[in-house]
Amino acid sequence: MTSLPCAVPLGVRLGFAEVTTATTFDVIDPATEKVLAAVSDATSTEWNAALDKAVPAGEIWAKATPRDRSEVLRRIFDRIHERASDFAEVMTLEMGKPVAEAKGEVAYGAEYFRWFAEEAVRIPGRAGTAPAGIGSMIITRTPVGPVLAITPWNFPLAMATRKIAPALAAGCPVIVKPAQETPLTMLLLGEVITEVLQEADAPDGLVSIIPTTKSADLSAELMADPRLRKVTFTGSTAVGRHLVRQSADNLLRTSMELGGNAPFVVAADADLDLVLTCAAQAKMRNGGEACIAANRFLVDESIAEEFTERLTEVMASFSTGHGLDDGTKLGPIITAKQRDSIHALVTDAIDNGATLTIGGEIPPGPGFFYPATVLANVPHDTKILHEEIFGPVATIATFSTLDEGIALANNTPFGLAAYGFSENVHTATRLANELQAGMVGINRAAISDPAAPFGGIKQSGFGREGGTEGIEEYLDVKYIALP
Ligand code: NAD
């Protein structure tokens, strides 16, 4: 067993209590394939106990003053920063990303607590007179109620803080079900949140963390309980669709942050130095295991050769290794299964005529590594251009006119992020307006910001996280009619 940098609580967190269960499951370091820890595997007993605690805690919390809620959130932000290196190391160990990137995620994930601390005291409302003059109307907001948050493994901290922070700011209790591959970061966060809530005399049961191997049972049972009022999910489109169906009987509020297939469109007049810097960022952030990762480089054919050569050079600099080792720029893929599915897409593309310029081979173990890979001249109907790669593989396809480039970019059922590059204001404006996605970066790859609404359209889901929109997901609108 690899040793963890700090004592992570390995039991299920039921509000303030840490509870161990009869069975456990192993968490693996994907860089070494060694067991990192054995975590309590929650069952029906624990998740129902979490909801039993959440309901009364939520009733008290909903009545806490916005300022009190805000201050609790702000303290959680501070406390995450105090433990930043613990969070970063635990995250690198269980997920694989280089520790510098993990530190970036800690700062980014914590920022949701600061942002929503500020939003907690600005929950909107309005008052007016009825047009017929027969009375007044007050429009206010009330907390939705108990929330189930289900999160993926790729950003073990931030994908959950984007949900916990606005829920608490709005006055809702939250039950978090982290991904089975990466529960340790969330258990550490549960401990930090518990410390702050206890110091603030907040009610017990506002935040529970329920690691389990029985996710489908947990969601089916909790979502059928009329006391639960909301499900917020980040993960694959297939599971999101299933959860939306499951939410129907109980008419739950839902937010769905699902898969993507981001196009990165490079017009002939783009600044190639800037494009290359942004291409590396958009493709290789989180080793390509990001929902907003550039999945398809769509490049004007007049510059495709130069772009391919230069991108190949950039990708060659991404050396693989353990995320805690100096010099590592690319960690392992999360599991062998995920690595094999990336390789299958690469092999299929080569079989269908794509040109491999670098990478493309699974190295010997241990660890689920996959090298930085570039595929050029990828035919437009190849599977890899239509599925989410979720790995360090850059695909390059070409277009001959901007109309064709935009049409290719939009030829996907997904619509999470899109990127467009041009030095011409008219072309850039067309890309901004015509790329079909919830988020569009123009001459820019780093688009995530807690102050901006993150989310998709089409099969990438609905609902927004962050921005002033993010808290609305946890609020119901209430209209009060007065004489
Ligand atoms: P996944 O859908 O397999 O799992 C996500 C979570 O759902 C995990 O906690 C998992 O245990 C749980 N889960 C799986 N089946 C379930 C079920 N039947 N009922 C309840 N819970 C269930 O996705 P993943 O492989 O962990 O993550 C990768 C996917 O997440 C990619 O498609 C990626 O694009 C997407 N993602 C989206 C965003 C976004 O904001 N849009 C962010 C990060 C990741």
Image: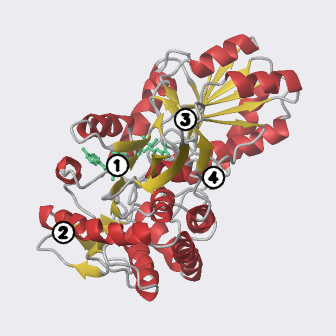
Q: Which residue is mark 2?
A: 49
Residue in the picture at 56% in, 67% down: 113
Residue 76 in picture, x, y percent from top left: 52, 76
Tell me where residue 283 sits by quadrant: top right
Whole-angstrom CA distance, mark 1 to mark 4, is: 38 Å
Q: Earlier in the sequence, mark 1 or mark 2?
A: 2
Task: From the image, state whether disc 2 or disc 4 is nearer to you.
Answer: 2
Q: Which residue is mark 4?
A: 318
Residue in the picture at 40% in, 59% down: 367
Task: From the image, state whether disc 1 or disc 4 is nearer to you.
Answer: 1
Report the amino acid beneath label 3.
Leu
Assign a secondary structure to mark 3.
loop
Task: From the image, state whether disc 3 or disc 4 is nearer to you.
Answer: 3
Q: Is residue 41 visible?
A: no
- Note whether ligand 1 is within 8 Å of mark 4: no
Task: From the image, state whether disc 2 or disc 3 is nearer to you.
Answer: 2
Q: Which mark is residue 28?
A: none
Assign a secondary structure to mark 1.
strand
Report the amino acid beneath label 2.
Ala
- Note whether ligand 1 is within 8 Å of mark 3: yes
Of the 4 image quadrants, the one containing the N terminus is bottom left
